[in-house]
Amino acid sequence: MARLLDPGSIIDSAEIASGTSGLVCEGLRGRLAQLVEGLRGGCDYTPGQAAATRRQLVKLLARRLAIARDVACHPEILDEVIAEPVFVIGFPRTGTSIQQALLAADPANRGVVAWQVHEPSPPPGEQPVTETRKAAAARVVEHFYERCPGLLTLHPYWDDGAETLVEDEEILTLDLFDNYPVVLCDAPSLAIRKADPDFTQAYEFLRLFLQHQQWRRPRRRWVLKGIEHQRHLPELFRAFPDARCLFSHREPGAFLPSSLAIAAVVYNAITDGALDRQTLAKGYLADFKQRIDAVMADPCMDDPRVTHVRFAHFIADPIAALRDCYGVWGFAWTSDSEQAMRAWLDDPANASDRYGRHHYKFEPFGVNWSELAPAFESYRARFLGAD
């Protein structure tokens, strides 16, 4: 057990797997040590669990080292300009996934998909991405949703396999600024991570990742999505000064049961049933209140680069809502843009209920929403208005 989850041993194996040496910086080494310490202290691992967790950590670190190797061999990657990226930001279950999908459908844009995270090297600008690499990435995604029964009912978009649009937290896990469950689902003590207070280096890595994936490819606007970005807008804008952000707002009482449900499905499965739903809800809702308070106090919410959209207005007419956003952002809205987005909406393969529909309630989590709801009145007044 000690050897299997030893940070130094994991680095050695990742270097062997990636054919690299000396590319692990002190920051990455420290983040690995912190992650492993948290995992080892979270529960008693069986030898099988420790071995499976080690394999995921080695694969994860090897991918990061492969990116570092590519940049060392082709330093001109760092000259790539990431121009006017669009970040879909906001709390989980507020329409961010469909916004990301529709924006990425525009031929002028480009989203980040699973194979780019799970098989990032060689970069696609160096040589064509083989179907074998994509199949390997698809197996990672499939392993995750098979590990978590019921997940596709709550979030069916993972069924796109290697072409699944990813969240930025998954990209940042490559450099261990997060611990996204897709790539660490075999660690039975994995828990929801509390974000670091300073995310400057995280956004520097995100920019590096995009440069790596953009190198020698036709230039398009990147579309990204993350549920933590609203906590780190100053750092985001330092790394991407011409970024545009789309922040969707929804009644908390409408989306929090859904957020709790998906967190319960994922972490109950990962911990092999050790999760207590009421304990989960207590911590989750306390953290959410802090997040709401931070949003309310953040002057970046008034930055013109942040466009606020009410979920109810967006879902009533997604095309019109995004057309308005393009106007605010100064982007050309073309017939190709609209046609591609409408085609995505009309495709039965994208129906949100294609695996059934989950009925979300607070009761299984022991939450009395009528007692908590008044705490969010200022948020409603500012961002939801009459909604």
Image (spheres, rainbow, N blue to C red):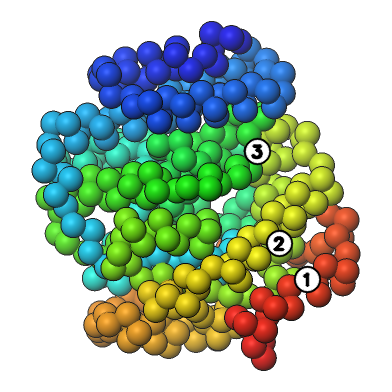
Q: Determine whether 75 is above or below 379 in the image.
A: above
- Residue that label 3 marks: 191
Evaluate if marks 2 and 1 touch, with contact meaning CB atoms under 8 Å apart.
yes
Q: Determine whether 231 is above or below 40 in the image.
A: below
Q: Which residue occupies 62% across, 28% down?
A: 38
| Mark 2 element type | helix
| Mark 3 element type | loop
Residue type for callout 3:
Ala
Q: Position of residue 64 (x, y in %)?
A: 34, 32
Q: Position of residue 267 (x, y in %)?
A: 68, 41
Q: Indicate left or right for 102 with 196 as reference.
A: left
Give the spatial CA distance, label 3 vs label 1: 26 Å
Q: Indicate left or right for 238 with 360 as reference.
A: left
| Mark 1 element type | helix
- Quarter of the image where one finds residue 242: bottom left
Residue type for callout 2:
Lys
Evaluate if marks 3 and 1 touch, with contact meaning CB atoms under 8 Å apart.
no
Crowd around label 2: few <14 · some 14–19 · many ≥20 (10 Å): some
Residue type for callout 1:
Ala
Q: Which residue occupies 53% across, 44% down?
A: 196
Give the spatial CA distance, label 2 vs label 3: 19 Å
- Quarter of the image where one finds residue 362: bottom right
Q: Position of residue 193 (x, y in %)?
A: 60, 42
> In the image shown, does 130 or 364 lie closer to the viewer?
364
Circle on res. 289: 2
Labels 2 and 3: the sequence-earlier one: 3
- Quarter of the image where one finds residue 375: bottom right
Q: Indicate left or right for 183 with 192 as reference.
A: left
Labels 3 and 1: the sequence-earlier one: 3
| Residue lying farthest to the bottom in this orientation | 386
- Residue that label 1 marks: 375
Labels 2 and 1: the sequence-earlier one: 2
